[in-house]
Each structure stands twice: as C-alpha cells, then as structure tokens.
Amino acid sequence: MSGLRPHDVPEEVDPSDWTLRVTGAVSEPLHIEREESSEFPLETVTDEFECVEGWVAEDLSWRGIRVGSVLDRADPDGDADHVLVRAMDDGYACSFPRSRAADALLAVELDGRSLSVVHGGPARLVPTAAGSDCWESVKWVRSLDVRDSEPIADDTAEGIALGDAE
Ligand SMILES: Nc1nc2c(c(=O)[nH]1)N[C@H]1C(S)=C(S)[C@@H](COP(=O)(O)O)O[C@H]1N2
Ligand SMILES: [Mo]
C-alpha cells in the first residue's frame, strides 16, 4: 500500500493508448510512444505527498524520467518560460514555470512497481520542489505544452481539485 488515496479513474482515461506529446513553443514537437520512453534514463525520487484536504502519504518512492530530459529533446524556444502539463481526464491541466517543470519527474513506477492507473499510471508528474501543491501532481499525463506566456486560463487543476471531492 502506498498511502495515497484511491480516487475514481475518470472514463476518459485510457492507459492502453498512452503516448506523450511535447507541443507548443518548441522546434521539435515530440510524439513519444510508450516503448520509446524507455530510451530516457530513470531516476528515483523519495518524498511524502500531502493533499490540501489534510491527508499525508509518507515515504513514496517514485521512479521515472526527468521532465527536463524530455523537454530538451524538443528544443524549446529560448523565451518559452512556461509548461502546461495536460492530463487524460478532460480539461485537467496544470501550469508550471519551465524550470520547475524541468526538475519534476514523470513517474512510471511507485514503490518498485509499475504505477497503477488508480494513482496516475502510465505516467504521473511528481514535482520535486518543497511545498508543491497536491493538484500539481498531475495523474495520467498526456502532454507537455510549452508556452511563451503563462497559460492562466488553461490552468484548471487547482479549481478542479478544490471544487470536487479529491
Ligand atoms: N489528472 C489528474 N491529476 C490529479 C488530480 C485529478 O483530478 N486529475 N487530482 C490531484 C489531487 S487534488 C490529488 S490530492 C492527487 C491524488 O492522488 P491519488 O489519487 O493518487 O491519491 O492527485 C492529483 N492529480
Ligand atoms: Mo488534493
């Protein structure tokens, strides 16, 4: 047991056709198939996870790809300072300054096992900065959209997280 809470998996989440796209202000838009994702080195991050609702899951060991290594391959425009991380559940997206996104992990394993769909598999964003908000841990990541201005209107994660039962 990981200590994370099980939440319902929305209907739109279909892990069987998972691919990762890198779009927006980049010179090489990427479309990475699941098999190709193994070309990136895996790193481990151990952390606790705290939801604003008041529960904590301690000592989670995430393993995944550093987002910066994926972004680098897409060659983002020099002045593109923001990344909108989009999920497979309709409309859920969270924006990050590019440097914070680059430091985050795109986790594919939790505590030594493939990340379950319930907890965001195939791939979940795990921000590494202290004090990250629970809604920034984006489950079911499907794309990294690089932007040259802050995508305020598209950043729905906080509103969805605070507005529903999560
Ligand atoms: N795609 C997506 N990611 C999400 C959410 C969501 O609704 N959709 N909820 C967030 C919130 S508020 C929390 S607390 C955690 C819950 O993670 P868990 O279901 O693995 O416990 O997922 C975060 N990531
Ligand atoms: Mo949360």
Image (spheres, rainbow, N blue to C red):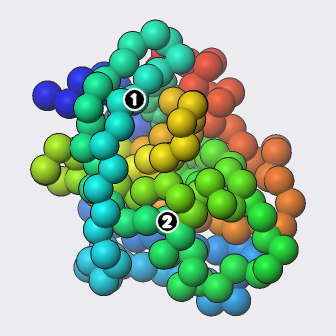
Residue on which disc 2 sits: 67
Residue 15 image offset from top left, x and y in percent: 31, 56
Left or right of 85? Residue 27 is right
2 or 151: nearer the eye? 2
Label 1 CB-ligand 1 distance < 8 A: yes
* Residue 26 shows in the view: yes
Q: In the image, is 103 to the left or to the right of 94?
A: left
Question: Type of residue at label 2?
Answer: Val
**Mark 1 secondary-structure assignment:** strand
| Quadrant holding the N terminus | top left
Image quadrant of residue 28?
A: bottom right
Q: CA distance from mark 1 to mark 2?
A: 19 Å
Q: Amino acid at mark 1?
A: Phe
In the rendering, which numbered label is found on residue 11? none
At horizontal 29% and vertical 48% (from top left) the residue drawn is: 62
- Ligand 1 quadrant? top left
Q: Is residue 83 left or right of residue 164?
A: right
> Where does label 1 land, which residue?
49
For image coordinates 66% across by 60% down, the residue present is 99
